[in-house]
Amino acid sequence: MEFYFNLLDRFYSSGGGTFILSMKFVGGLLSIVFFGFIIYLNVLMFRLQNPKGAVEKIEEIVGEDFGKIPESEKREVPKKWQSVLDKASSPTPSDWKLAVIEADTIMDDILKKMRLEGNSFGDRLKQLDRSKLNSIDNLWDAHKIRNLIAHDPNRPVSRQEIDRAIDGYEKALDELEFIF
């Protein structure tokens, strides 16, 4: 209790000026801190309202771009692609057909890894356009040839059809930087 009376005595003997000055100083500091916090929250809200900025921020935090495939997975494609090319250069038409089906599977796996939604290769392919893949028409043609082969295995295929299909897949893989 004596402490309380000493504090009151000191306050009244100094006219309370020191205490009031101290309170003004602390209040000013708190005002500056809260004003800075309000500015920070406004900047944060602006970034969140800008979808592109928000996606970039999330990508920065997560460390990967949407639709991008890690380099480690990209390294596997050239090996698989070489197997397709070997089959496509075979003198046997059944190997040609197998080459087109394998190429389609490689491309479908890539589209899945790019996180394109859909139940089929065609559904995933519909999510792409020329702005995302310039060789989209070639890829559609290649996939149509694959469908002809898969749905009618006894149908004869010409060397030109096989070459057109392989070329379509190759252009897409090259554009997506899977083969060089």
Image: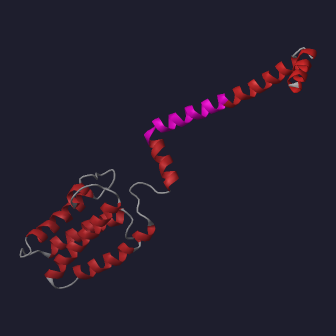
**From what the image shows, is residue 14 above or below residue 58?**
above
Q: Nearer the viewer, residue 66 or 42?
A: 42
Prevailing secondary structure class for the magenta stretch in the rendered image: helix
Report the quarter where the C terminus lies: bottom left
**From what the image shows, is residue 159 above or below residue 131?**
below
Residue that protrudes farthest toward the front in the picture: 1
What residue is shown at x 91% (from left), y 23% (from top)?
A: 6
Taking 106 as reference, is 162 left or right? Answer: left
Q: Nearer the viewer, residue 30 or 56?
A: 30
**From what the image shows, is residue 156 above or below residue 16?**
below
Q: How is the image coloured?
A: secondary structure
The mark total stands at 0
What residue is shown at x 15% (from left), y 84% (from top)?
A: 92
Residue that protrudes farthest toward the right in the picture: 13
Q: Position of residue 147 (x, y in %)?
A: 14, 66
What residue is shown at x 23% (from left), y 57% (from top)?
A: 137
Decide whether residue 44 is among the magenta residues: yes
Question: Over which residues does the magenta segment extend?
Answer: 34-51
Q: Quadrant of residue 160?
A: bottom left
Q: Position of residue 52 (x, y in %)?
A: 44, 42
Report the quarter where the N terminus lies: top right
What residue is shown at x 83% (from left), y 24% (from top)?
A: 22
Q: Position of residue 23 (x, y in %)?
A: 79, 23
Q: Quadrant of residue 139?
A: bottom left
Q: Position of residue 96 (x, y in %)?
A: 18, 78
Decide whether residue 72 is among the magenta residues: no
**From what the image shows, is residue 57 above or below residue 149?**
above
